[in-house]
């Protein structure tokens, strides 16, 4: 459910962000990652780090504030690929896999952590929701209408209906 919700919420957020001017896209509004550009890149960077940890494949980063895709269209393309990758990977998980131990080394505190996979996976989705909230606020600060992103709205759509 969270993988499908994540893809849906990102698509809605990117539809709204696409309306920003070049100046608005990169304007520092003093959000945690500064601008919409910094915020949306951070979400992708963190997803790449986590998916590399989870699967052992794909791009990764060493700095959480990397901006690998300053161009909106390029970032949107990469976001779509990542969202599809997340959905595909989550669909392979079993209850046994979720309960199994998973080890990783955080970027910010390089000491290995081991815990059941379900816990970091929950963090993975919560992290995206947290920073989408920042992007939502950035749209408001810039005078644009942010889209409703509540999980319950997703669950009322055809995409979310199987989970309801």
Image (spheres, grey):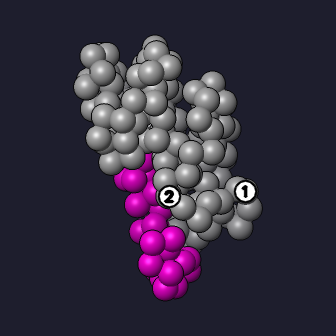
Up/down of 115 relative to 155, above or below: below
Q: Position of residue 85 (x, y in %)?
A: 66, 46
The answer to whether any part of residue 124 appears in the image is yes
**Please, what secondary structure does the residue beneath circle 2 have?**
loop
Residue 5 horizontal side relative to residue 72, left or right: left
Q: Which residues are magenta?
A: 101-130
Does residue 81 appear left or right of residue 117 in this picture?
right
Q: Residue at x 74, y 62 (%)?
A: 57
Q: Is residue 1 magenta?
A: no
Q: What numbered label is drawn on residue 47?
A: none
User: In the image, is residue 115 part of the stretch drawn in magenta?
Assistant: yes
The local secondary structure at tag 1 comes to loop
Q: Give the residue number, with chain letter if any, for mark 2.
A: 64
Callout 1 crowding tier (Cα within 10 Å): few <14, some 14–19, many ≥20: few
Judging by the rendered image, the residue that carries numbered circle 1 is 58
The x and y percentages for residue 102 are 55, 77
Residue 158 visible? The answer is no
In the rendered image, which quarter contains the C terminus?
Answer: top left
Q: Position of residue 158 (x, y in %)?
A: 47, 23
């Amino acid at each position: 459910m969270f993988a499908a919700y994540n893809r849906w919420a990102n698509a809605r957020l990117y539809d709204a962000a696409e309306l920003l001017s070049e100046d608005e896209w990169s304007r520092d509004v003093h959000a945690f990652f500064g601008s919409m550009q910094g915020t949306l890149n951070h979400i992708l960077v963190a997803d790449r780090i986590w998916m590399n940890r989870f699967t052992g494949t794909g791009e990764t980063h060493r700095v959480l504030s990397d901006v690998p895709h300053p161009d909106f269209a390029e970032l949107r393309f990469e976001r779509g690929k990542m969202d599809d990758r997340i959905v595909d990977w989550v669909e392979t998980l079993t209850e046994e896999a979720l309960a199994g131990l998973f080890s990783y080394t955080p970027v910010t505190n390089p000491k290995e952590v081991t815990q059941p996979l379900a816990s970091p996976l929950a963090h993975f989705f919560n992290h995206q929701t947290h920073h989408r909230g920042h992007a939502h606020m950035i749209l408001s600060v810039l005078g644009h209408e942010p889209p409703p992103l509540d999980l319950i709205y997703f669950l009322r759509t055809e995409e979310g209906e199987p989970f309801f």
